Every structure is written in C-alpha cells, then in structure tokens.
Image (spheres, rainbow, N blue to C red):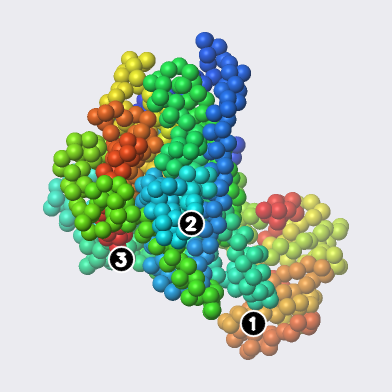
Amino acid sequence: MSVITQKSRFGAAQIILFFSIAILVILVAFPVLLIFFNAFWVNGEFNIRDVAKIILEPETYQALTNSLIIASGTTIGSTIVGTFFAWLVTRTDLPYKSFMKSMFLVPFMLPSFIGALAWKMLLSPNAGFINKFFMNNLGFEGPIFNIYSYLGIVLVEVMYLFPFVFIQVCGALERMDPTLEESARISGAGLFTITRKITIPLVMPSILSGALLIMLYSMAHFGTVAVLGIENGIFNIPTLIYQRIHQSAGSFASIRTGTVLATVLVITAALIIWLQGKILTKGHYQIIGGKSFRPMELKLRALRIPLLIFCLVYIAFTIVLPTAVIFLVGGLKTYGLAFTWENLSLDNYKFILFDYKLTKDAIWNSITLGLGAAVITMFAGVMISYVIVKMKVRGKGILEFLGMLPFSVPGSVIALGVILAWSGQFGINLYNTVWIILVAYIARYMAFSLKANSAALEQVHDSLVEAARSCGATMWQSLKYIVLPLVRPGMLAAFFLIFLPSLRELTVSIMLYSPTTRTIGVAIYTLNEDGETVISAALAGIALILIIVGQTLINRFTRKAGA
Amino acid sequence: MEIIRIEGISKSYGKHQVHKDLTLSIERGECFTLLGPSGCGKTVLLRLIAGFETPDAGKIFIDNQVVADPVAGIFFSPESRGLGVVFQDYAVWPHLSVFDNVGFPLKIAKRPKNELRDRVMEMIELVGMKGLENRLPSELSGGQQQRVALARALVANSSLMLLDEPLTNLDANLREEMRFEIKELQRKLNITVLYVTHDQEVALAISDRLAIMDEFGRIRQTGNPWEIFERPADPFVFNFMGIANFVPVRRVGDAYLVGSGEQLIPWEPPRGDAPEWVAGFRPSDVQIAPTGTGLRGIVKRASFLGAMIDYLIEVDGAHLRTSIETHEAMSKGLMFKEGETCVISFRDLLWFNAESLAEVVKA
C-alpha cells in the first residue's frame, strides 16, 4: 500500500476509450457523415428539396421500389421456407434429420452471387441449360422460366438467405421448454391448437428477428441483382449506386445520387435494427431457457417419406445442381459446348491458378486483404468491446452509440463513404490502391468482431477481473493474464467470421477496385460481364473450394476448442 | 485497534441512494459480519472497502491509512489495498489450474519460484485440496472451487479478508462444514475477516461481532451474536434474526390487554406511557398447557414437522405461533387438536412500541 493513485483524468481507461472512439469515428462515423453531408449539403446550404427531387427521379425511384419489392419478396419467401424446414428438422420424426440440418446450413457458406451466376447458366431465357433442354427436347416454344425477373431474383435470394431464419428458429425450437407444450396438452389442447397458441407465439420473436435480418441483408444486397437484374434493367439501391459511380467516374451528380440512395439505405437499416431490438427485448425470450430439452416430436406417418423426398429434391436442386453447374462450366473449353468428356478438362483451372495474371492477383489480393482485415478488426474489436462491456468510464455512451453504427451500415454505403473520405479531399488519397479496400473491409466487418468479442467478454464475469485486482494485479496485468486468455475463443471466432466472408466479398470491392486490385469476387463478376463465362465459372469453383476448405478447418478447430 | 474505519460514507447509483452517512469500524483480529436482507447494500459496502467502487462522500481507512477520500482526491486502487477477497461466485479463473489460481497473487508480486511453490502448496494443503493442484476449475465441485478461492485470498498473507456471501452457492451440508472451516482458519491465522451475508444462522455461528443492516442501508444494531439475538434493538432486528411473534397489546388504565379481548398479558408491563404496544417473542419462548394460568386461546392449526410440532394459536384476535419438541409434547400430554382450547405463558418477551412494528410489517 505505498502507491497513492490520484484520480486522474487521463488514466489507462481514458486512453483506451479515446482510441476506441477514434477508430470507430475515423473508419465508420466519418465516412457515413460525409455521405449525409454530401446528400443534404449543396453549395454551402442545407437542401432537402434537392434530395426529394433526386429520390423522385424515375430511375432512383424505381431502384428504391425495386429494393423494397425484392427485399419484401425475399423476406416472406425465406421466412416461410426457413420456418418450415426448421420445424421439420426439430419437431418431426423426419429421417436423417441431423444430415438435413447441416445441409440446410450450407447456403450460408455459398456466396449468393456465385449462386446467381449458376442460375443464370441454368435458367437464362435463351441460353440457360434447363430452358434449352425443355425447348430442344420437349417441344416447348419459349423458355419455361426467365431468371432475369423479379421472381427469379427473389427465388435465388431465398435459396441463399433462408438459413438466417432457419438457424434462429431451430435454436428457439430446440431450447424451448417442452413442459410449456406438455401442460397445454394436459389442458386438453390438440396438437394444432398447441402449435397455433403456444409454439408459434413463443418462437415468433426468433422468426421475426431472422426475417428482419434477411430484410436488412436483401435491401443492401448487390450480387444477385447485379448478376440477374441489370440485363433486364432491374436495379436496386446498391446496384444503382454502383452503376452511377462506375459509369460517370465520380461526377458530382452521380455522387450526389449515390449519397442520397445510401442515406435511404442507412435509414432503412437503422429502422430495421431498431425494430429487431424491440422484438428481442420484449421479454418473450425468458420463456426459452438456455438448456437443451428433448422436444415433443410429431409423427409424420404417411407424409414421412414424401417429405423426405421433398427435402432431398430441394437440397439437390438448390445446392447440388448450382454447384455442379459452376464446376462443369468451369471445365468447358468454350461456353455453349455440351457437357461431354472431350469438351471437359482442368485447363481453365490450371490457367487461372498458374498463368492468368488477373485471377492470380485476385486470389492473392483476396487472401491478403482478408488476413489483414481479420487481424486488425479482431484486435480493434476486442478493445472496443472491452470498453463497452466491461469498463466503467465516463463517455462510454458515445462509444456504445458508435459501436451500433457498423451494424447498420451496409457494404455499398461503406464503399461510397470511403471513396468520399479517402480520395484526397482530406489529404489522404488511397483511391485505386488496395488500402482503400482494406479500410472499407475493416469498417464493414467491425460489426462481426464487436459481436463475437462482446459475446465472449460477457462470459467473463466481472468478479474474475475483480479477483485479479484484489490479488494485486493492475488493470493491465488482469487484462493480460485473465481477460485475454478467456476471450481468445471469441477473438478467433471474430477472425474467421471476417476472413472467410472477405474471401468472397463483392459488394464493397466492386466499388473500389482498380485494374490491379481486383478481389476474387470482382474478378468473377467482371470476367462474367466480359463474356468470359468459363473462366469466371472456374474461378468461382476455386472460390467455392477455398470457402469450403476454410469452413471445414474452422469447424474442426472450433469443435476441438470447445471439447 | 481498528483495522477498518468507515467515516460518513455515502454512495448512490443514479437516483438510488444505497448508503448515506454510514459509519462503522472493525477491530483487528475479529470476525465481523455484515448481516442484512438482499439488496440492502452490504455488498456495496464490501466493494467500497475493496476498492471496486468509489464512495461519493466520506472516508475509508485501512490500517489507519486513508484509502478513499473523494474530497481530498485520494483513491487507492484495489490492487494496492493488500486485501484478500472471496466472491460469492468463487471467481476462480477457469483457464488456470488450482495451483496457478492460488499462485497468481505471488506471481504478480514476482516472488521467487521456490518460495511461490512452497507457499502455494502450503495453502492448498491448508484448505484441504492436496492432490488436486493440477485440476482445472471445471473439474472441481462448487465446494472445492470455494476452497481454491479461499486459498488464493490467503496466499499473499493479507491480514484482512473480505468474504462476500461465499457459501450461498453451496448445498446445505457443505455450507455448514465450510462455515466452521472459515472460522477455524480465521483463528488459526489470526486475521481479520469481514463477512457479508443474508444468512443469520451463518452470521451467528462465525461472528465475533455483527452489524444488522436494513433495506435502506442503515445499520440497526452492532453487537456480539448473543446481544443481537437476545437483546435486539428493534422489531426489525428481532424479526430478521428468526421467526418472530408480534402481538398487539393495548393499555387501558394500568392494565395491558392482549388483542381485542380483556385478558391481561402475563408479563412485566413496558416502561413508558404509550397506549399501543407490541409484545415480541420467539415461538420457542411460548409455553403451552391445557389448563393453568396464562392467556386462554384456541389452537387454529397444528402442524407436525417431525421433531417439532408447530401450533398456530389465536388469543382474542391476535395470532401467534409456538413450537414444541414432539417427544416433550407426547410425554407431557401437550398434543392439541385444531379447535381445542389452551393456555399459554411466556419464558421471554420484549416490548416494542407499536409504530416501530408498522415499519417492519410494511417491509
């Protein structure tokens, strides 16, 4: 007891808080503010009439409605599909349930724009394999389905987004205390009544929160609409932003339109997140305990086999078929040839891996960007989460607010923001370099890191740190010996949560790439746009392999760490 | 000689005032218990002493050294106060073995390896965990984790230990065993223990002195266990220390009558001239008989609890409980049925004024 610690204004806590705020302000808040500023501030004055004018322009207005139509359709479709499959694998005696469950989670891994590419190959009105098959062999006069349509876009998005609802509802159904249903049964309620009056109301928060997540994702989703919509003049907000910025090479008017559209996206996203928070804090969750119970199972009886076949067909049609098409087309000598042994080879794969500079660069860029973003964001996220979850320091409220920001800022908005912020207007010009993509990735994936790290930190009870302090450890020592070792799993989770998605990232990098800074996603997309279908498919195949290998490694790794 | 002195401490969280102008001192070498209902602020007081919280006003002295004084801007961080703390949830670090948990304070103090090893093993043996030093906390029972936490708090030779409800999460048998062990350790090592709990039984069993705190963070009474139990300062303390009967008694002239009836209370009248009084007594202080002198009442409920029989008795609109050992009831013919009349007298009885009771009933 020799040291008197005077209560100073600038202790370690204040330094950490300052850095945390600085990171979020520079990387996230500043670019977003620039977007608002550019949208509303013209010639030195606040101008809202102009904003309204831009929104009401036919093209922008159309893009806004399209985003809404596609997002609504996708949300409704995914919610129905996700809830149905979740119920099927948790509450019925469907055969091979655990296999089915893991299969339904596969679309999580698959980048939806690669899926869209596959469906384009299968169902484009004139050249799609399925359409051609029907026209040539079964005597159909026209294509049976045109994927370049609202319905096509919605269906493809549903295929890749429904796991958001599926996983939430599965979790809720599994954790739900079966006595809640059993007591209803004892009171004389039939299974149908129980489902309607007990089960559905109890899992409703999970369904809604999953649905809102899909809404948020779909509103801001670039890839599917870019691949399937542009052909037919269907633009949504992110694709229109991209098109404007790209075509006009940064003219004032196009930036203006971009910022207005981005503002709409941010506001919508904030609204959705606010709604989700409301639903989740309504207290419904208290009924659902943390323990695993053995829930009541419905006997499907005569429907058991038909439903099994239905599930298998669904999996074959939405997962196996598109993946197979990507790999097969990637093996073709020229697009349009039939899938026969003499037309198929591994030459394209060899070419993109060893000879073609563009794709080699893209793979290298994606991997280094992913690693860089993952490491930086992991450490920044752990620091910021620590302040938010654990520290009692004045000014924390600002950080809590800033910490919410990354969650509600979609990728295309981040990209536009970093263009505004780091193209030289403020002394730093990163435009056309790989650094601008890195900065954007950090901003984009900060939300993942904050989520994983705060979850891990919340597990570290305050008393563990206090015990260390009372044992004579300073704040830094208790961080080093107690907190960091305990949150290491959360940090690793954050790392992989960032590294894997960044391998397949398209929305951000498409707005920021230069000829030498293509990412895998950009390369696949631009090669496909340029008509290099087979090369693009082969690269997509490589991307799928990278993602699946990465995911398998993580699964094995996390299982080991958990054991 | 006092080891902790708290002078006029105030602490609030937002609008909720937990402590207001609280003063307390704890003597060196004693086992002192802060006893109070949950939410009364006793843990906050312990955290203020440990340095996890800062007081809004007032001073805290440890070993005659000011460790917290917001006016003078003095605040000693927890690690500089040299205390041992045991937490309610054990707070044993899940990623460290028993040995590393116990050795942590010495590692931080940069003690030589050999010394560290000997001292840690000594402590592990002291708390009866020998042979388990390489286990991880997840491989230990709750009681064993609690022992690790104790050893860790003791290892650095602190002369002052703060224990925050350390036994709450243990099952009943273990709790009983551990409370004697804690007392035993305190005596053997001659340290000061500040023990915080809401369990009056534990408090009575281990304390040299204890303080009773009410839900507003005020200290109602400080004293040794015997004083607290037998000479409670007010109905709150009396009620908190066990099942209590409170029977209203009214003064009519010089006579003190029970309930709404005309029977005189068979006890010395209270000192004072208030018209309304309350007689407080424990169920065990009531003597029940079929006939004789005393208050006539009716048995409203008889509950057989195994070793004891519990009667609820009505005397002129006032209800009271008494308990009697079953074998005594059998041998002395004191088995009553519901609805039978009986006569009761008192072995002990305390007078409280009626207003102070209203406060207890409200709480």
Instruction: Identify which residue, B263 or A258, lies in the foreground.
Output: A258
Label 2 Cα crowd, 10 Å radius (few <14 / some 14-19 / many 20+): few
Picture coordinates of residue A527, whole percent (x, y): 30, 38
Can you identify the residue that label 3 sits on?
B139
Residue at 32% of width from left, 39% of height from top?
A531
Is residue A230 something one can see in this rendering? yes
Residue at 43% of width from left, 51% of height from top?
A123
Is residue B35 something one can see in this rendering? no
Instruction: Identify which residue, A374 or B50, lies in the foreground.
Output: A374
Q: Secondary structure at mark 2?
A: loop
Comes first in the chain, label 3 or label 1: 3
Disc 3 sits on a residue from what chain?
A: B
Q: Which mark is residue A140?
A: 2
Between disc 1 and disc 2, the foreground one is: 2
Residue at 55% of width from left, 12% of height from top?
A45
Vertically, is A465 above or below A183? above
Can you identify the residue that label 1 sits on?
B304
Residue at 38% of width from left, 67% of height from top?
A99
Hey, which quadrant is residue A436 in on the image?
top left
